[in-house]
């Protein structure tokens, strides 16, 4: 059994305005994804599955294969709008695939062992990968999954609202519920709030959130496929509906399939939601390089 890392790199990057998955941030041209792959390999991962769009597959492979192809097994799968629709016809004005849970479903043929899922454009930190690898080796099974949990206050952007999977957790660190909140920000009074259906709600700074760093057993795939069919029946004709991973987590718990552990990490998270976030990310990475956490060049 060899835990697999699954990297979600097919996003349209609509808010950011460019292909942020391949933008350089490190001193030797490293992307955020390079640091995640480096941390994953250092933590024991030997197989990386990239979920990408077919239209930029050649450019993507030309960038990442020379760096990592000889350090881990690399596999590429494509998320397309018609993947796993099984004859379902979407709305005529549908312009993009169905979201993060759909992306994971697209990786089903390539994944046969317990696996972690991450975003390509988020920096998670070494501690997060070490804890994920340990869980996948020792604690993951068809009825026990996990999320690497970050404090909400440490995951905001100063340049606009963000989307976060906000977790409700019991006293055993088990997930009770998770809800994707798509407009989270700190208001003028200093309170973290989110908007939904024209109303505003407060959230504690210490609320645990999912940054889409999940750990699953391959048994999750038939479950995702089942929930996707139900999602299409309910929301498939909405041109911008999205099938998020938190939908899977929430249904998994509430249908009695098992439990999802929240694994807290002390690692620093940072990411690039908006172009204005980029200088801060670059400065944070340079500081980690200067302090010796990372070499000046990740790959030779």
Image (cartoon, rainbow, N blue to C red):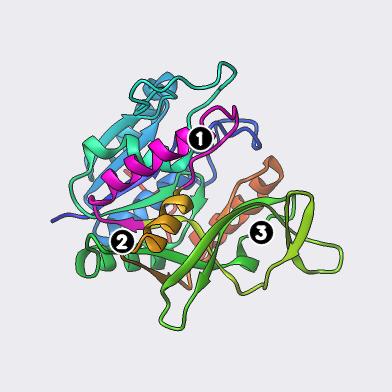
| Mark toward the start of the polypeptide (1 vs 3) | 1
Q: Which residues lie in the magenta part?
A: 215-244
The vertical placement of 200 against 21, above or below, is below
Q: Is residue 286 visible?
A: no
Q: What is the spatial separation of the Cα atoms under label 3 and label 2, in whole angstroms? A: 32 Å
Residue 158 screen position, x and y as percent:
74, 55
Q: Which residue is mark 2?
A: 257
- Number of marks in the image? 3
| Mark toward the start of the polypeptide (1 vs 2) | 1
| Viewer-side label of 3, 2 | 2
Residue for point 31% across, 47% down: 223
Say whether marks 3 and 2 touch (CB < 8 Å).
Answer: no
Q: Nearer the viewer, residue 186 or 46?
A: 186
Quadrant housing residue 274: top right
Residue 133 screen position, x and y as percent:
28, 63
Callout 3: 10 Å neighbours few (<14), some, many (20+)?
many
The vertical placement of 210 against 277, above or below, is below
Q: Which residue is mark 3?
A: 156
Q: Which residue is mark 1?
A: 11
| Viewer-side label of 1, 2 | 2
Answer whether residue 223 is magenta in the image: yes
């Amino acid at each position: 059994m060899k835990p697999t890392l699954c990297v979600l790199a097919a996003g349209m990057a609509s808010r950011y305005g460019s292909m942020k998955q391949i933008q350089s941030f490190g001193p030797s041209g490293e992307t955020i994804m390079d640091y995640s792959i480096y941390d994953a390999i250092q933590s024991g991962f030997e197989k990386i599955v990239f979920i990408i769009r077919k239209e930029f597959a050649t450019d993507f492979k030309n960038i990442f294969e020379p760096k990592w192809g000889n350090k881990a097994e690399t596999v590429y799968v494509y998320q397309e709008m018609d993947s796993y629709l099984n004859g379902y016809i979407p709305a005529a004005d549908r312009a993009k695939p169905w979201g993060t849970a759909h992306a994971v479903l697209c990786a089903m043929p390539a994944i046969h062992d317990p696996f972690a899922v991450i975003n390509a454009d988020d920096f998670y930190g070494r501690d997060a990968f070490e804890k994920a690898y340990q869980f996948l080796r020792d604690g993951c099974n068809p009825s026990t999954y996990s999320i690497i949990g970050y404090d909400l206050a440490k995951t905001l952007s100063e340049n606009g609202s963000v989307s976060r999977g906000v977790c409700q957790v019991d006293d055993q660190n088990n997930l009770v519920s998770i809800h994707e909140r798509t407009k989270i920000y700190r208001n003028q009074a200093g309170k973290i709030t989110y908007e939904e259906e024209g109303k505003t709600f407060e959230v504690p700074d210490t609320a645990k959130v999912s940054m889409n760093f999940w750990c699953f057993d391959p048994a999750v795939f038939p479950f995702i496929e089942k929930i996707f069919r139900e999602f299409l029946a309910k929301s498939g004709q909405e041109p911008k509906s999205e099938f998020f991973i938190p939908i899977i987590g929430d249904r998994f718990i509430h249908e009695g399939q098992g439990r999802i552990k929240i694994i807290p990490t002390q690692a620093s998270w940072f990411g690039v939601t908006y172009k204005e976030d980029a200088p801060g990310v670059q400065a944070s990475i340079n500081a980690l390089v200067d302090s010796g956490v990372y070499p000046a060049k990740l790959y030779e």
